[in-house]
Image (cartoon, helix red, strand yellow):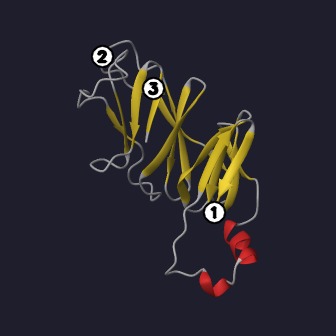
């Protein structure tokens, strides 16, 4: 996942370093040559897995980890070529989010929506709260439960478009 933020390009998790964010030099949003020092591990041993998504949220960058955690990366990263974040803060979570869909993050009408197997959640950039019931229950209501089991897979997708929030399960 890539996102432009503060005149830099950020990579949020990659195959070599799935728990790290990395960033380009300031003003070099389109370059592919980044400094090896422009990287930061985001609580790699917190038990929430790898980074799966990130969004620009005002002056901050918010990263999402696979098993239900989000962190706000605070700082201006300086004007130097490398730059560094000032602070990393965990968002407050009222209840367990569960496994977040890789393409399950969308900004819609001034809020961050998070789609997971446990349901739809919403954040103001500081706290994450439940917005809906479990996604599993929607699927079970729509199809026979025997068709939805541990051997079957499904893709969750969330997108804000033209004033509406779309969810695909």
The answer to the question of whether label 3 and label 2 lie on touching residues, with beta carbons closer than 8 A, is no
Identify residue for label 3.
Answer: 86
- 99 to the left or right of 143: left
Identify residue for label 1.
Answer: 169
- 137 to the left or right of 79: right
Q: Quadrant of the N terminus?
A: top left
Q: Earlier in the sequence, mark 1 or mark 2?
A: 2
Identify the image quadrant of residue 42: top left
* Residue placed furthest toward the top: 79
**Mark 3 element type:** loop
Residue 115 pos. (x, y %): 63, 55
Q: Earlier in the sequence, mark 3 or mark 2?
A: 2
Identify residue for label 2.
Answer: 81
Residue 127 pos. (x, y %): 68, 43
- 2 to the left or right of 36: right
Q: Nearer the viewer, residue 18 or 72?
A: 18
| Cα–Cα span, label 3 and label 2 | 16 Å
| Cα–Cα span, label 1 and label 3 | 37 Å
Q: Residue at x 40, y 22 (%)?
A: 8
Q: Nearer the viewer, residue 39 or 104?
A: 104
Q: Residue at x 30, y 29 (%)?
A: 38
Residue 11 pos. (x, y %): 38, 37
Q: Residue at x 67, y 39 (%)?
A: 161
**Mark 1 element type:** loop
């Amino acid at each position: 996942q890539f996102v432009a933020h503060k005149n830099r390009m950020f990579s949020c998790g990659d195959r070599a370093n799935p728990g790290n964010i990395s960033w380009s030099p300031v003003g070099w949003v389109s370059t592919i040559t980044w400094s090896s020092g422009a990287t930061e591990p985001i609580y790699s041993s917190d038990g929430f897995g790898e980074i799966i998504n990130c969004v620009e949220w005002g002056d901050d960058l918010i990263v999402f980890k696979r098993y239900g955690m989000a962190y706000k990366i605070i700082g201006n990263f300086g004007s130097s070529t490398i730059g560094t974040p000032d602070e990393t803060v965990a968002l407050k979570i009222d209840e367990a989010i569960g496994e977040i869909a890789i393409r399950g993050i969308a900004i819609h009408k001034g809020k961050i929506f998070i789609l997971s197997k446990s349901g739809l959640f919403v954040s103001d950039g500081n706290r994450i709260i439940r917005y809906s019931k479990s996604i599993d229950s929607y699927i079970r209501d729509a199809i026979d439960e025997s068709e939805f089991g541990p051997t079957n897979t499904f893709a969750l997708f969330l997108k804000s478009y033209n004033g509406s929030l779309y969810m695909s399960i």
